[in-house]
Amino acid sequence: MNVQELKHPGLKQWVEDAVALMSPDSVEVCDGSKAEYDRMIQITIDAGLATPLNSEKLPGSVLFRSDPSDVARVENRTYIASEREEDAGPTNNWINPAELKKIMTELYKGSMKGRTMYVIPFSMGPVGSDIAKIGVEITDSPYVVANMHIMTRVGTKVLEVLGSSGVYVPCFHSVGKPLGPGEKDQGQWPCAPLDKKYISHFPETREIWSYGSGYGGNALLGKKCLALRIASVLARDEGWLAEHMLILKITNPEGEVKYITGAFPSACGKTNLAMLIPILPGWKVETVGDDIAWMKFGKDGRLYAINPEAGFFGVAPGTNNESNRNAMESCKKNSIFTNCGLTEDGDVWWELIGHGAPGKEIIDWKGNKRPAPQSDKSPKGEEIAHPNARFTAPASQCPCIAKEWEDPAGVPISAFLFGGRRPKTIPLVNQAKSWIHGVFMGSIVGSEVTAAVISDQVGQVRRDPFAMLPFCGYHMGDYFKHWIKLGQSHDESKLPKIFFVNWFRKNDEGKFIWPGYGENSRVLAWIFDRCSGKGKAEETPIGFLPTLDAITRPQGVSETDMQEILKVDIDGWKAEIADVRKNHYPKFGDKLPKELYTELDAIEKRFNA
Ligand code: OXD
Ligand code: MN
């Protein structure tokens, strides 16, 4: 489709203005067809950016290698440009919106020369769902178009819902690498240097402007930018929740079904939990979403969640048939791999994939030939796949996708989980005493830093409230307030119950006590039962903990181990509370709701009682 055929006058004008600013050689409005996807992939293959993979092992799949300077989300180049700095809050970067638009307009001038501008109408959530939102991304990257095809619903059907006056979130994206006459990418991933990259959000006008990066959340603007940063602002204003949460469907042996959502900071096994294979006989766990949940109240007063995405953008290293067989199956075909190793037989390889690589050589993520690894580990410090290498796979290919994953009405949520990597103190599972206590739990979520995140802070606990720190489009203190307000304005008995889980407790030798993965279904079963008013628990100063016999023990976990991970570590909690009081809550200044200090005081008092 060409721009002239657009039926929405505002959208047409916006595209025409962008064309005048960015000067692409040509413009295409995406229709979302398979033919279009195939064409995008062919364009990237012809430009030397994509390598087709072995058509028997990974049919319809390709591998990309990005520039080494463009391998992850760039949090220090990500901006919440609200009118007032205090509305962005202390945990977001801020630039005055007019000033930022001026800087970026200069960068966008002629930035698409030599390239095609693609106009991608996309829906976050099933097309036409009341909970869904429409965005339109303008990009000069066919890699982005292909990824958006998998991660969102794209094309003509979205324009039909938008009609001639519908509301959409306008999203600009340019890789920031115009081409001179006759110039081609020739295998060189196009992007701009770090100090020219901007991932900008304008919360009042609900706009997204991204420049200089072609990678992941910086460029696939439906995901973190729209579905979390902008949507969190919409949710605050409209009385719903846009959260960094997976969505699970759980069925017990009696056939009863419950849905739960869960927020975990990066590197805590969220995708693995979203696709868990339960070891408990008779229990079934299915996936509705692995990263983001949008939740609105139904007429019955319950919260209903949709997964706004249509695919998985999963971290490859560490994914194998033991840790996540369903993810391995999901990316067996029609998938896009980025920054993985390439084996001699045209297969992908990454650290902890579960096997060595065939043949003599392998090509690493930087395009260098290296000796093929015999085991599933690379030489230390010389990864063959980048630690943030990714697979983009259609959710519909997931063997455990729930049949209602695209239900436009969403699924009713019974429980929220919060979690993090906490080697000490935080028990295996703990149920909040009330909504406000649960909000308190969410506000202090923390996770031990692993080498994959920030190497110079390994072992320290980094607080990441609600796992939203990099994704909240406004002041986090106001975000806490929004959660508290929802509790106050709804019938608490119909709200999800809140739990804190921790699969990562370690013993004094530094070994994990709890085996995790499928064994976590033992904990999910207790949570499920608690939501039905069952499941044995004991009230403690920190919340409801399972009694020792309430959760069956996995092999290799002794009764003493179980006691250890289910007890209240009084000294550890006192230190935790002191840390929150001294180092965490003060960051939010006077926007930190007083109700949270009241919770903190109450827990402290219970210890001293
Ligand atoms: C992600 C993240 O990539 O949370 O989903 O970092
Ligand atoms: Mn995420």
Image (spheres, rainbow, N blue to C red):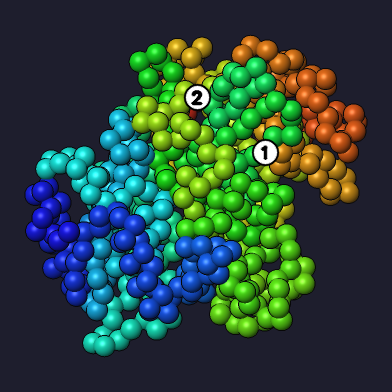
Within-10-Å neighbours for mark 2: few <14, some 14–19, many 20+:
many
Q: Is residue 357 above or below residue 5?
A: below
Within-10-Å neighbours for mark 1: few <14, some 14–19, many 20+:
many
Instruction: Where is residue 419? Give x, y as percent.
Output: 63, 37
Tell me the quadrant of the picture where the C terminus can be found: top right
Q: Is residue 491 above or below residue 247?
A: above
Tell me the quadrant of the picture where the N terminus can be found: bottom left
Give the camera-side residue of 61 and 559.
61
Q: What amino acid does circle 1 point to?
A: Ile
Give the camera-side residue of 241 and 43.
43
- Per the rendering, the mark at residue 277 is 1
Asked which secondary structure carries label 1, the reply is: loop
Asked which secondary structure carries label 2, the reply is: strand
Name which residue lies at 14% across and 61% down.
2
Name which residue lies at 60% across and 69% down.
347
Q: Would you say residue 129 is visible in this rendering?
A: yes
Q: What amino acid does circle 2 point to?
A: Ile
Residue situated furthest bottom in the rendering: 182
Instruction: Where is residue 194? Give x, y as percent.
Output: 43, 71
Instruction: Where is residue 59? Give x, y as percent.
Output: 51, 62
Instruction: Where is residue 354? Give x, y as percent.
Output: 73, 59
